[in-house]
């Protein structure tokens, strides 16, 4: 059956997940209809300009908190957070939104994911009803090219001068416009752009990733022991006569005019309200 979304007079969206044939009856009394939801966090209000300004203003503090925090895994071992590049950008947005009761809708090539959904998607039972469960669920199918989904996930920025903290740099111009790496902007000035980024260990290209999934080692799954995420790195672009030169402050790697390889994006906060 083709998908169908119903929008109520109040603006709420509901997905019809099944059709059923009913038996006619003369009983016209009101009936109770129960809908079960998967709620990762409750939506308390919509995004406003003040929320967006707060996101840009506080993103560096949140990014550093997530970079340094530790947690206990299921075996009781203390672990440090690890992320692939796009997963780090996702986690910042998700944690900011969840702590304030703000809605999120993120779209991949598989489907759109909301913080409150009608229960029934095949993966719902595998994830905790928390912001961490939502982040893990989305990360499984969300890649760098999904940040390039303008009109749904993001809006495109045209110049480095328009960049704000919380915006994203997507490395794509060196691969025919297809995104393959993401950096999160944390601080800007007229002559410098500071970033933080997740990264990936080892090769994460097909057919290797397909083979690894078949044998149960999914490098895109944060809940899998083979997850490719690494500790968060820091870097900085500096404006020079050659362009925006880059230095990775964690590894020491440098590249002249490196920003030329990147496209610039901002989360489409207004779309999250729809």
Image (cartoon, rainbow, N blue to C red):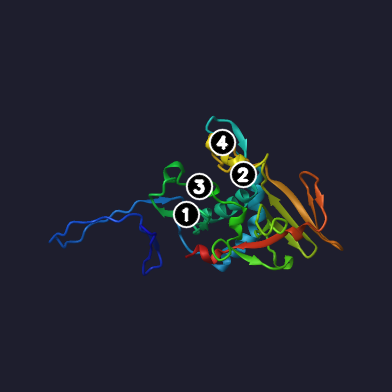
Q: What is the tally of numbered marks visible in this picture?
A: 4
Quadrant housing residue 2: bottom left
Quadrant housing residue 245: bottom right
Q: Name which of mark 2 and mark 4 comes first in the sequence.
A: 2
Residue at 73% across, 67% down = 161
Q: CA distance from mark 3 to mark 1?
A: 11 Å
Q: Quadrant of the N terminus?
A: bottom left
> Residue 206 appears at what percent x and percent y?
61, 44
Specify few, some or many for label 3: CA neighbours under 10 Å numbering under 14, 14-19, or 20 or more: many
Give the number of the disc on residue 137. 3
Specify the farthest residue to the left: 26
> Residue 65 appears at what percent x and percent y?
64, 47
Give the number of the disc on residue 217. 4
Q: Which residue is mark 1?
A: 115
Specify the farthest residue to the bottom: 9
Residue at 54% across, 34% down = 215
Specify few, some or many for label 4: CA neighbours under 10 Å numbering under 14, 14-19, or 20 or more: some
Q: CA distance from mark 3 to mark 2?
A: 21 Å
Give the number of the disc on residue 206. 2
Q: CA distance from mark 3 to mark 4?
A: 16 Å
Give the number of the disc on residue 246. none
Left/right of residue 177 with respect to residue 141 in the rendered view: right
Mark 3 or mark 2, whichever is nearer to me? 2
Q: Secondary structure at mark 1?
A: loop
Mark 2 or mark 4, whichever is nearer to me? 2
């Amino acid at each position: 059956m083709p998908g169908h979304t119903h929008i109520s007079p109040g603006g709420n969206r509901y997905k019809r997940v099944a059709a059923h044939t009913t038996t006619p009856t003369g009983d016209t009394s009101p009936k109770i209809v129960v809908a079960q939801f998967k709620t990762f966090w409750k939506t308390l209000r919509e995004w406003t300009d003040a929320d967006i300004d707060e996101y840009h203003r506080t993103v560096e503090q949140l990014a550093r908190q997530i970079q340094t925090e530790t947690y206990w895994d299921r075996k009781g071992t203390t672990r440090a957070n690890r992320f692939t590049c796009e997963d780090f950008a996702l986690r910042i947005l998700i944690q900011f939104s969840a702590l304030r009761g703000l809605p999120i809708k993120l779209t991949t090539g598989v489907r759109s994911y909301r913080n409150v959904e009608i229960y029934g998607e095949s993966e719902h039972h595998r994830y905790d009803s928390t912001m961490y469960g939502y982040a893990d669920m989305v990360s499984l199918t969300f890649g760098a090219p999904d940040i390039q989904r303008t009109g749904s996930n993001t809006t495109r920025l045209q110049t480095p001068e328009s960049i704000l903290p919380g915006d994203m740099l997507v490395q794509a111009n060196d691969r025919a416009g297809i995104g393959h790496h993401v950096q999160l902007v944390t601080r800007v000035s007229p002559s410098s752009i500071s970033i933080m980024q997740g990264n990936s260990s080892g090769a994460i290209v097909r057919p290797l990733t397909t083979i690894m999934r078949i044998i149960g080692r999914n490098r895109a799954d944060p809940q899998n022991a083979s997850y490719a995420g690494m500790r968060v790195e820091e870097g900085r672009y500096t404006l020079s006569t050659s362009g925006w030169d880059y230095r990775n402050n964690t590894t020491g790697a440098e590249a002249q005019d490196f920003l030329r390889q990147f496209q610039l994006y901002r989360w489409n906060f207004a779309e999250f309200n729809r």
